[in-house]
Amino acid sequence: MKQTIAERLAEHFTRMRAGSLPAATRHGVKRLLLDYLGVAIAGSRSESGRVATRYARSFGGKAQATLIGNGARVPMEVAGFANAICSHSIELDDIDVLALFHFSPPVYSAALAAGEAAGASGKDLVAALAAGCEMMERASKATNNALRNRGFHTTPTCGVFGATVAAARLLGLDAEQMTSALGLAGAQASGLMEMYGPSMQKRFNPGPTARNGVTAASIARQGFTGAATIFEGERGFCNAFSGEADPSQLVDGLQRPYKLEIEFKPYSCARPIHNAIDCALDIRQRYNPDLNAIARIVMTRHPDWAHYHQNATPRTYHEAQVSLPFSVAVALKEGAALLKQYTDANIANALIKRLSGRVEFVVDKRLPRGVSCKMSMELADGRKLVSQVDYPKGSIQNPMSDAELRAKFDSLAAPVLGEKRSAQLAEMVQAIERCDNVRRLMQLTAPAPRR
């Protein structure tokens, strides 16, 4: 009998070993682990991160896994839930190339929670993270851009499969059990793009995803069976969520080493806005224009993202982080778009509000990439300043170096953990394959106890 897609994937992922991974994959997974931990630690101090942590601590139950930035230990499903929200709460998490989803909130949160509960080694963790990221990206390639265009959020809908595979490996599932876990993951796939606005809605989406991945793996290990046809079935994931899916992408090239393409964020906002910020910073550096003399800012965008992020009057930092006009304005004024730029003071700033109101949008399908931006700034004296960015900072073609990622980590983790503990955590990530128990890593993700 012909194997289903889930059965083929389960065999592939249960066979994967850290030692057989390409060096570039191992390095990429570790770069992302450092980035994830820094973002989650800082995110634990955000409004939404505090609520999620408080909620998780209210559960009680087995002390299986650590709440990042807090140190309390809670059931692994609850830890995955809260840590995923923390890591998505400051808009500095990673992205992929096709759909601009985020690997680490669902996959890394589930893996670290399950790995700590199971007493897994760092070497096992690396293999699980690589497997989870590959699974998530395969699901996205099979269903996007149609999935996103139907209103589904890729990070949770595809991320639940990656979270499940990562957790299943660390909990020791065999191929038959992982097949069931994938079916149960599909039953829990969810997440809508109706998430922009002043609320915390966007931060929430990865939380249930990480929790559901751990749940699917855990209950499958207990013998609960799931649908092996979850991907290609008539009412399965591909047909239900996409309608224009190519299920072959889920298993294409399984016999070859998989090339993960992970991009990183230098700015604390939605990824499709980064090109516009780079345009603004480029013009600021090259021309140093008088900001009070700016008459118009015309943003030409590709149709893929042209109708997103247009809110010029954000009311909260949640809205500001998905506002292209605000992000451009604050970058022009302050020369940066980091966490400290997305504040109530800047939202109320008269110059930033005026510059935000000067932004106009034009759609041009001739731009080379979905995230491409061309900024044309018109000044009161008639001059026009132009910048176009197709590959933003942090992209594969314009990458952040290891040193830049470490500096980003230090800036996020040190204010919470202190410089010494932050450095210890970064050093353990670099040598994670030599870590005998994931719990040793997670113990460093909270401030040291006071003596």
Image: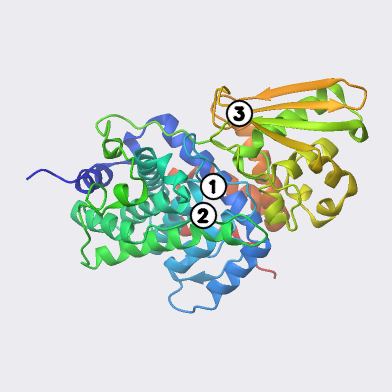
Question: Is residue 158 positioned above or below 213 on the image?
Answer: above
Q: Residues within 10 Å of mark 2 (few under 14, many from 20)?
A: many
Circle 3 SS class: loop
Q: Residue at x 66, y 48 (%)?
A: 322
Q: Residues within 10 Å of mark 1 (few under 14, many from 20)?
A: some
Q: Residue at x 60, y 73 (%)?
A: 54
Rendered image quadrant of residue 217? bottom left
| Quadrant housing the N terminus | top left
> In x, y percent, where is residue 373?
65, 29
The answer to whether the residues at label 1 and label 2 have Cβ atoms under 8 Å apart is: yes
Count how many numbered circles sit on residues in the image.
Answer: 3
Rendered image quadrant of residue 250? top left
Task: Tell me the distance, in whole angstroms, between the alpha carbons under discs 1 and 2.
Answer: 7 Å
Which three-letter amino acid code belongs to the residue tagged 1?
A: Met
Circle 2 SS class: helix
> In x, y percent, where is residue 370?
54, 31
Q: Which residue is mark 3?
A: 372
Q: Nearer the viewer, residue 437 or 327?
A: 327
Q: Which residue is mark 2?
A: 441
Which three-letter amino acid code belongs to the residue tagged 3?
A: Ser
Q: Residue at x 67, y 42 (%)?
A: 408
Q: Which residue is mark 1?
A: 428
Question: Is residue 367 positioned above or below 128 on the image?
Answer: above
